[in-house]
Image (cartoon, grey):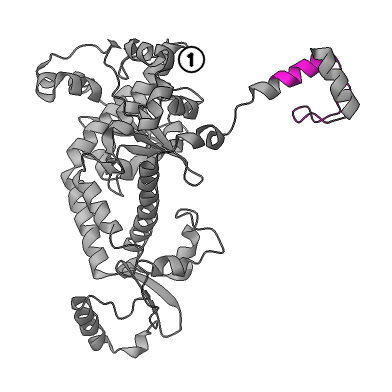
Amino acid sequence: MAALLLMKWNRSNLFHPQCNSLLIISPVCVMECWSRLMTTSKRVQDRSKTKRVHDLEVATEKHKIATKVLFLMEVIKKEPEMVAPVRSLEQYRRQINLPKPHSLVDFIRKSPKLFELYKDQKGLLWCGLTGEAEGLLKEEDKLIEENMDRTAEYVTRMLMMSVHKRLSLEKIAHFRRDFGLPADFRVGWANKYPQHFRVVKSPDLIEYLELVEWNPSWAVTELEKKALGESDAKDTSPSVPGLLSVPFPLKFPPNFKKVYRIGGKLDHFQKLSYMSPYADAQGLEPGSKEFDKRAIAVMHEILSFTLEKRLVTDHLTHFRREFVMPQKLMRLLLKHIGIFYVSERGKRFSVFLTEAYEGRELIYKPPLVLWKEKVLTLTGYRGKRNKIETFSDYSDSENESVIRSDFEDGKAPITVA
């Protein structure tokens, strides 16, 4: 076979795409190159394009829009008087994924109920928040405050799952909105629960959140709680985490069921015992079935902690070492599509916990998710392009009354729609 391939390639004098050289070489090298060519995995987009779920792709799009708008609102909130020159906002293009030549001003104009645009006497364009947007941010702060204890529990349980019982504050920041953490969580919130965790610095000055005390009653997975029932789970005496046999809830789109049930592989997977996410997994062999299923349990648990039961996948990959998860995490997520769904919209992928969704909607929506949906209803509006007024068009005394009366009529006089 190798000789036949060599003769064929020699006649055509082709370059091998992996070796990048003429294929007038030994049969050993030919077979080595051929092996690499055959085992090279396809891109995630190519391997999963036939498995897309429209409803969850729509949910991803909504999340992307909300993320951009909320980031910009948060930036302006930190500015004096909650206004900023549009020129200074240009530096955040990467964070809101708005590459040139797309106009930042056009992006702001799409949400006139949240952002105001106006010029000062020198003609400099500024952006501020509407009264409605300021009210929404105050409402968010209140909801975050009310949810703090539950968030502290989830973060503590993440520390309990980690190998060294500590996580970098910088990495936790990736999960901030997904968990409902306040913007200043590194300073204020992180020191509010000394009974659970503390902030420590490594010799290279990296800040970590470190577990203070192990809580046995929290070392019970969300799957176990559902299997036992919340009340029964609370009454159960805490024990050392070990092997679990709780099956994962599966939710397939109708056209996927037959594909993934062939050969009884799915039933075999569900019956396989696995190590609890809270048990020490350092002795597991990478690549083994036990290792992979335990990694799935960890991902299921982390997604269960999030407000929307979804995360950007590269946020998960930041924690591979801390949670003892495989290097090819994406491949594992795609393989278990009944448990997870990976959306590939844009450059960053998102992973959903399928059991938590009915169509494109979350089955249970926490208050912070309902708040986010309220913000979404105020975005994307395309109205007429109004004249951008300047400060000189109004006196200081007139400006406040005009804005108030126009808001009562549902209009913003100095907003570019």
Nearer to the camera, 404 or 250? 250
Give the residue pinned by disc 1: 286
Would you say residue 27 sits in the magenta stretch? Answer: yes
Q: Secondary structure at mark 1?
A: loop
Residue 339 image offset from top left, x and y in percent: 35, 27
Amino acid at pointer 1: Pro
Residue 306 image offset from top left, x and y in percent: 29, 37
Is residue 302 among what the camera can see?
A: yes
Assign the N terminus to one quadrant of the image.
top right
Structural crowding at the residue carrying mark 1, measured as other residues with C-alpha within 10 Å and reported as few (<14), some (14–19) or many (≥20): some
Residue 141 image offset from top left, x and y in percent: 22, 53
| Residue plotted at (11% across, 21% down) | 234
Q: Quadrant of residue 227?
A: top left
Nearer to the camera, 333 or 358? 358
Q: Quadrant of residue 359?
A: top left
Would you say residue 310 sits in the magenta stretch? Answer: no
